[in-house]
Image (tube, rainbow, N blue to C red):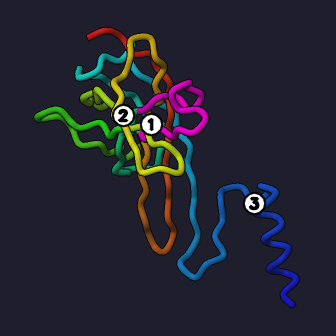
């Protein structure tokens, strides 16, 4: 019926369209992947520093911290939900500069939540020394019917407090 629409859907499924596209009436979605790194191993409950670059300018973001997806505690019937890091008292807001860069200090969460699939049971687990965690800086903004999503990811080990 609409061969052009089928062609666009095929291009989107093959990943040939570049940034993700949306055929909805609300506009397009643009995904920007930046880079992130930490200064050292992360201490639960301690102040940590995250360096981010390559995200959209003036993007407000949050910092979810959780075990890496390949962690044994998050395999099989379990799914792990990262904890959201918070700003220290008097800390800078989680927002990139006009060049899409930022260095922020955050308080490393001490726990994350693990859910069992097919059940309402959940448990709170503490980060263990030597465990690898995934630290993300992700946020979105909507401007003139274009939704821009920014994400930067790094992996770091957990150290003793």
Does residue 124 appear to the left or right of 78 in the view shown?
left
> Disc 3 or disc 1, which is closer to the eye?
1
Return the mark for residue 112. 2
Q: Which numbered disc flags the more N-terminal residue, 2 or 3?
A: 3
Residue at figure coordinates x 47%, y 38% from the top left: 80
Give the structural element (helix, strand or loop) at label 1: strand
Residue at figure coordinates x 58%, y 32% from the top left: 75
Quadrant (top left/top right/bottom left/bottom right) for the C terminus? top left
CA–CA distance between discs 3 and 1?
A: 25 Å
Q: Which numbered disc flags the more N-terminal residue, 2 or 1?
A: 2
Residue 142 versus residue 124 in the image, above or below? below
Give the structural element (helix, strand or loop) at label 3: loop
Which residue is tagged 3? 17
Coordinates of residue 53 in the picture (x, y in percent): 46, 35
Residue at figure coordinates x 50%, y 59% from the top left: 148
Return the mark for residue 136. 1
> Disc 2 or disc 1, which is closer to the eye?
2
Check whether the beta carbons of the residues at disc 3 and disc 1 lie within 8 A of each other: no
Query: Does residue 100 show up?
Result: yes
CA–CA distance between discs 2 and 1?
A: 14 Å
Give the structural element (helix, strand or loop) at label 2: strand
> Is 44 covered by the magenta stretch?
no
| Along the viewing direction, whichever of 88 and 123 lies nearer the viewer | 123
Coordinates of residue 6 in the picture (x, y in percent): 83, 77
Residue at figure coordinates x 79%, y 72% from the top left: 8
Give, as a single range, the part of the protein colored magenta. Answer: 66-81
Sort mark 3 into few (<14), some (14-19) or many (20+) by Cα contacts within 10 Å: few
Q: Residue furthest bottom?
A: 1
Coordinates of residue 60 in the picture (x, y in percent): 34, 50
Sort mark 1 into few (<14), some (14-19) or many (20+) by Cα contacts within 10 Å: many
């Amino acid at each position: 019926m609409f061969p052009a629409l089928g062609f666009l859907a095929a291009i989107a499924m093959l990943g040939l369209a570049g940034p993700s596209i949306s055929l909805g009436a609300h506009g397009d979605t643009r995904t920007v992947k930046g880079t992130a790194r930490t200064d050292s191993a992360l201490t639960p409950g301690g102040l940590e520093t995250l360096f981010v670059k390559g995200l959209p300018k003036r993007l407000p973001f949050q910092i979810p911290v959780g075990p890496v997806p390949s962690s044994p505690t998050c395999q099989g019937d379990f799914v792990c939900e990262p904890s959201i890091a918070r700003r220290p008292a008097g800390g800078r807001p989680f927002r990139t500069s006009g060049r899409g860069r930022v260095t922020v200090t955050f308080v490393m969460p001490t726990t994350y939540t693990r859910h069992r699939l097919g059940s309402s049971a959940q448990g709170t687990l503490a980060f263990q020394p030597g465990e690898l965690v995934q630290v993300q800086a992700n946020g979105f903004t909507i401007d003139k019917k274009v939704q821009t999503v920014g994400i930067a990811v790094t992996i770091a080990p957990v150290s003793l407090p």
